[in-house]
Image (cartoon, rainbow, N blue to C red):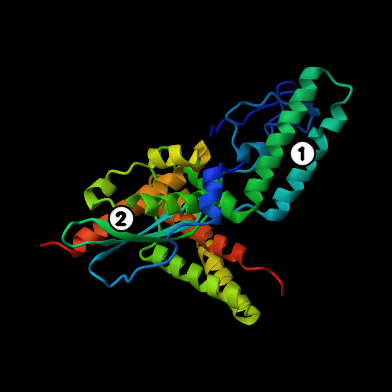
Amino acid sequence: MAYSEKVIDHYSEPRNVGSLDKSDNSVGTGLVGAPECGDVMKLQIQVDPETKEIVDAKFKTFGCGSAIASSSLATEWVKGKNIDEAMSIQNTEIVEELSLPPVKIHCSVLAEDAIKAAITDYKSRNQD
Amino acid sequence: MSFDQPACNKCETTLVSQLFCFSCKTLQHFPKGIDFFEVLGFPVSFEIKSAELELRYQELSLELHPDFYGSSSEAEKLLSETATAILNSAYKTLREPTLRADYILHLLAKKQKLDERSLPEGFLAKMFFMQEKLDELLDSGNTVKLSGMRKDLQKKKRDIEADFAPLFRKYEDNPEDTVIPQQLQTNLNAERYLRRLIERIPAND
């Protein structure tokens, strides 16, 4: 099955690959997996403690091209959003943007799960 | 899975495989929802002897092969093709322990809703760590360490596979149990992660 141009773009030049300091309290880390294909995805966000805006995001994904592209796109989208806005990102938006075929929808679900896991982790570390 | 022994459409001899009657050498009109064990003529069990499986597959392929039905009716030709296709799928699935485990689990656990994504506690973090470590080793091209990592991963994979037989034995004895099938699903998921890691290591020694 051919990948869409946008998938190839993100796959060949993934944005925001890397990691943030897990122990920093302004960082939230989401680690999720898709056991049906053996993919594992780590997505991290750095949050401004005052404005709750996501100022940086990094990811590292071991998986297929669509999983890499979905997480790369996810980091681009969360940057500049506040954590509540980012929480409402839906996997269907990722599917649409990357023109993912039905067999690759789970990759977008994984990216949505990773965003939510990272935000949940951030919140749990910053309960006032 | 019925306990009634299916019989030949033509001579009424009890069938070994639902695809073909070895007694009167007739292709059978097999039911659509036939499972792979009925295809090859074995009871549903994880413990299947590979020599027996191999032999049955050979016997059936010889009888079903579309080449032998070149001058038969269109219906028979089609039947030999569909029977051969399902025979090949059944054989490929049942001969490989992991595929067989996955297949039987879903056959037996039909009524139960399994958590298809379960993994052992802390497993995902370990797999992420191993993937990163593998990246480093692949970059450094350290073949000694790479080969060591492959051996280590293969051992972990074998340990999981070694649990299949005793777990299935328990499950086949207690088909209403809900803990064992979930444990099997978890093991299958973990095995898939290990397999993906092993696949990334070039086999050059």
Residue B92, position in %: x, y?
67, 47
Is B49 rendered above or below residue B72? below
Tell me the SS state at disc 2.
helix
The residue lying at 74 percent from left, 25 percent from top is B79
Residue B138 position within the rendered picture, expressed as x and y whole percent measured from the top left:
59, 72
Residue under numbered circle 2: A117
Tell me which residue sits at (39%, 52%) in the image: A76
Q: Secondary structure at mark 1?
A: helix
* Residue type highlighted by circle 1: Leu
Image: B103 above or below A59: above
Decide if residue B23 is on the left or right side of residue B139: right
Q: Pick whichever, B50 or B152, lies toward us.
A: B152
Instruction: Read off the residue under disc 1.
Output: B60
- Please give the chain letter of the residue carrying mark 2: A
Nearest to the observer: residue A115 or residue B131: A115
Q: Are marks 2 and 1 on the same chain?
A: no
